[in-house]
């Protein structure tokens, strides 16, 4: 049964234990300076955001039908039956179509590295494969982030709303957005007030992103096309970097 994460913003105390747990799982640095960064990046795959007196989290949504997977021309990104969207850096050719296709603007790029990779949360795919909780859920001291079967978490979210209707905004974010995601949110206020994108479509995106793939050159067909692809990638770096800098 597919797994998911349920994040309840009403329970979050902003302690950032999820950030620390995530950094440890990925072997990434984590200190006071990084903790103060309220945005995801190549060295920070989840981030707690402050919205007045409320908190929220940013991380890969691991969509049920991910646009990033549909546009990747080399299969570096894969949607697993267990739920996570995984990334294979050895296959990646650095085109960064995934960064352009993601409706949540999640994938980031290691711009400063000599051999850069795309970075994103994969919902602790290896841990879940071995029956463990995601690192963020394991680290959360108040149960604001929990991990389990998606159907069970949807039922849990609905139960919380029904039991305390005055506490919750009457919707589950991620239930239908872009066809559904593996990360679900509960909030006391409309989701845009805790920084979530509410202008995304309610249908899955891969069918429309196939139109993008039609424009991707077959880089293995001839040397000329290969060189053209390299030229395109090089000249897109500045544009993607500019867009990445505008991300919330």
Image (cartoon, rainbow, N blue to C red):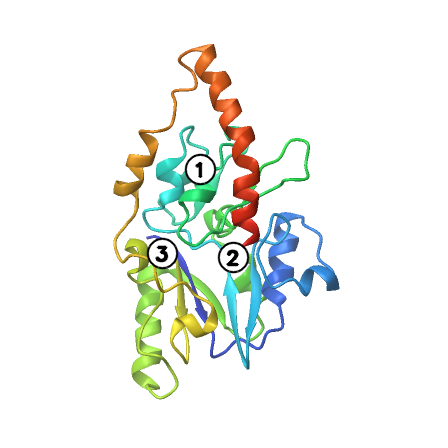
For the question of whether residue 80 can be seen, the reply is no
- The residue located at (49%, 37%) in the rendering is 96
Q: Nearer the viewer, mark 3 or mark 2?
A: 3
- Please report whichever mark, 3 or 1, sits nearer to the chain's N-terminal start: 1
Crowdedness near tag 1: few (<14), some (14–19) or many (≥20) residues, C-alpha within 10 Å: many
Q: Label 2: which residue?
A: 134
**Residue 245 at x, y percent in the picture:** 57, 52
- The residue located at (41%, 48%) in the rendering is 102
State if disc 2 and disc 1 touch (CB < 8 Å). no
- Please report whichever mark, 1 or 2, sits nearer to the chain's N-terminal start: 1
SS assignment at label 1:
helix
Q: Label 1: which residue?
A: 97
Crowdedness near tag 3: few (<14), some (14–19) or many (≥20) residues, C-alpha within 10 Å: many
Q: Nearer the viewer, mark 3 or mark 1?
A: 1
Question: So how many labels did they put on this image?
Answer: 3
**Picture quadrant where residue 4 is located:** bottom left
For the question of whether residue 211 can be seen, the reply is yes
- The residue located at (44%, 37%) in the rendering is 97
Crowdedness near tag 2: few (<14), some (14–19) or many (≥20) residues, C-alpha within 10 Å: many
Q: Label 3: which residue?
A: 181
Residue placed most toward the observer, 43 or 99: 99
**Residue 227 at x, y percent in the picture:** 50, 17
């Amino acid at each position: 049964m597919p797994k998911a994460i349920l994040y309840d913003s009403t329970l979050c105390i902003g302690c950032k234990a999820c950030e620390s747990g995530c950094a440890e799982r990925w072997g990434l640095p984590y200190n006071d300076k990084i903790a103060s960064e309220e945005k995801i990046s190549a060295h920070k795959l989840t981030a707690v955001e402050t919205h007045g007196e409320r908190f929220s989290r940013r991380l890969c949504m691991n969509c049920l039908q991910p646009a990033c997977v549909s546009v990747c021309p080399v299969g570096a990104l894969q949607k697993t039956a267990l739920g996570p969207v995984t990334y294979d850096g050895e296959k990646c050719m650095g085109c960064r179509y995934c960064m352009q296709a993601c409706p949540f603007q999640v994938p980031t790029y290691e711009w400063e590295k000599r051999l850069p990779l795309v970075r994103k949360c994969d919902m602790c795919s290896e841990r879940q494969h071995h029956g463990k909780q995601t690192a963020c859920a394991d680290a959360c001291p108040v149960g604001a982030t929990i991990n389990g079967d998606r159907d069970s978490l949807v039922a849990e979210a609905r139960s919380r709303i029904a039991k305390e209707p005055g506490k919750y905004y009457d919707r589950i974010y991620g239930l239908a957005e872009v066809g559904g995601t593996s990360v679900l949110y509960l909030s006391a206020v409309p989701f845009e007030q805790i920084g979530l994108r509410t202008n995304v479509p309610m249908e899955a995106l891969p069918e429309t992103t196939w139109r993008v793939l039609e424009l991707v050159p077959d880089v293995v067909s001839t040397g000329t096309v290969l060189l053209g692809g390299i030229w395109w990638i090089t000249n897109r770096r500045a544009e993607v970097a500019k867009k990445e800098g505008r991300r919330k």
